[in-house]
Amino acid sequence: MRVPYLDLRAVLAEFVPELDAAWERVRTGGRFILGPELEAFEAEFARFCGTEHCVGVASGFDAVRLLLAGVGIGAGDEVVVPAYTAVATWMAVTATGARPVGVDVEEESFNIDPDLVEAALGPRTKAIVAVHLFGRPAAVAALGGLAEQHGLVLLEDAAQAHGAEVGGRRVGSFGRGAAFSFYPTKNLGALGDGGAITTNDGGLAERVRLLRAYGWRQRSESEIAGLNSRLDELQAAFLHVRLARLEAHNDRRRQLAALYRDAFLEMPGVTPPDDGGSVWHVYPLRSADRDALQGRLDAAGIGTLVHYEPLPHLTAAYRAEGWRPGDFPVAESLAASEVSLPLHPALTEAQAAAVVAAVAGGASG
C-alpha cells in the first residue's frame, strides 16, 4: 500500500460543500480585503485561543516578523530562539534587523531547553521566542519566569500548534503575543498562505494592525512605516470553516500518534516521541540509521520528510554569521536522526498499519 506523507485532497474532502459556500459568499459579497470574513475569523480564532485579540496577516513568517516589530524589536537587538526550528523563526528575527541567538533544545521535546537560556542572554537581549515545535508546547512556565526575571518579552511561535494546551490553557495565550501560520499543511490550514497574531495586549494588536497595512488607520494616511501583509477575505472564510472541526481533527491526530507509539515503543532501532500535550503537526520518529530507514520506507511507498536539515544555524545564511557544526549538539543529533511519518486527520487505520509494517521491516532489517 502506498501512503503519501500528506494527502490534502483527502483532508479537505469533508469540507467541500462548506468551502464552496464560503467561496460563493465572498465572491458575491464583493469585499476581498479587510472585510467581514476576516473580522469574523479573527474574533472566533481569538476566542478559540483564549485571547482578546487576533490580527490576520499574510503568512506565518509575517506573523513572527510583525509580532517582533510590534513589541519594538529592531536593529541592534538580540532575540533568543531555539536551535531546532524552521529557518523562518530565525529569518523573521533577521528581517527586523535584530540578531537571532540560538539555544540548544531538550532531547525529549525537541523544544528550547529553559536551563540553557540564561547563558545566552546579554545586554542586547530583548525577547525569547518559544517555538511549540511539531505541535508540542514549549516549557512556557519556565520561559515566562526567565523572561520576567530578566525584563524580557516572551513571544510564542505557535505556527505548528493550533489547539495545543498547557494546563487547560491554549498556546497563543501565554506570551505577550503569539504567531500562527495557516500554511495549507498546518493543523489549521488555508487553501493558500496566511497567518495571524494573537494577544491580550490591545496596544500590541493595534500596532500590528497598523503595521500590516502601510501604517494606515485611515486609507492613505500612514501613521507609521508599515508593509502589506493582510489575510484576505477568501482565506479567512475558508479558515473559519476549518476551525469548526479543528478540535476533532486534533483528536484524530492524537489517536494516530498513540497507535504509532504503541507500535514503536518496543521496536528495535527506533525511538518514538512522547506525548507532551502535542497536537501532532509532525510525528518525528528517530533512528540512528535514519537515512537508510527513510530509503527503505520510500521503496515501500511510504512518504516521509525530514524536519529540519540543515538546521537554521547550519544554512549558508547563518554560517556566514559565524555559527558552526557542534554549536548545538542536541539539536544536531536530533536533526540527523529524525524522520517524519505520515500523520493527518484523513489517514486511515490501514494506512497507519502499512506505515508501522514498513518501519518494522526497515528498523529490524
Image (cartoon, helix red, strand yellow):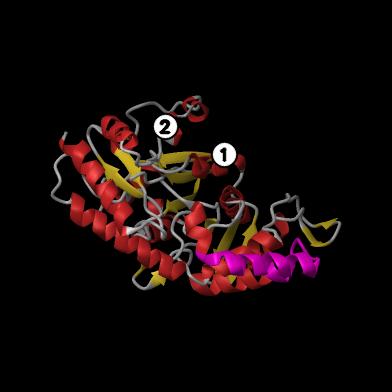
Vertically, is 284 above or below 276? above
| Percent x, y of residue 187 | 46, 58
* Residue 206 visible in the displayed image: yes
Residue drawn at the location 42% of the way across and 43% of the way down: 85
Residue drawn at the location 39% of the way across and 26% of the way down: 324
**What amino acid is found at the position of numbered circle 2 in the picture?**
Pro
* Residue 62 within the magenta-colored segment of the rendering: no
Q: Which residue is mark 2?
A: 310
Q: Which quadrant: the C terminus?
A: top left
Instruction: Report the residue that reaches farthest toward the right.
Output: 220
**What amino acid is found at the position of numbered circle 1 in the picture?**
Thr
Main SS category, magenta section: helix
* Residue 270 visible in the displayed image: no
Q: Which quadrant: the N terminus?
A: top left
Circle 1 Cα neighbour tier, 10 Å, few/some/many (<14 / 14–19 / ≥20)? some
Over which residues does the magenta segment extend? Answer: 14-37
Answer with mark 1 or mark 2, whichever residue precedes in sequence. Answer: 1
Which label belongs to residue 94?
1
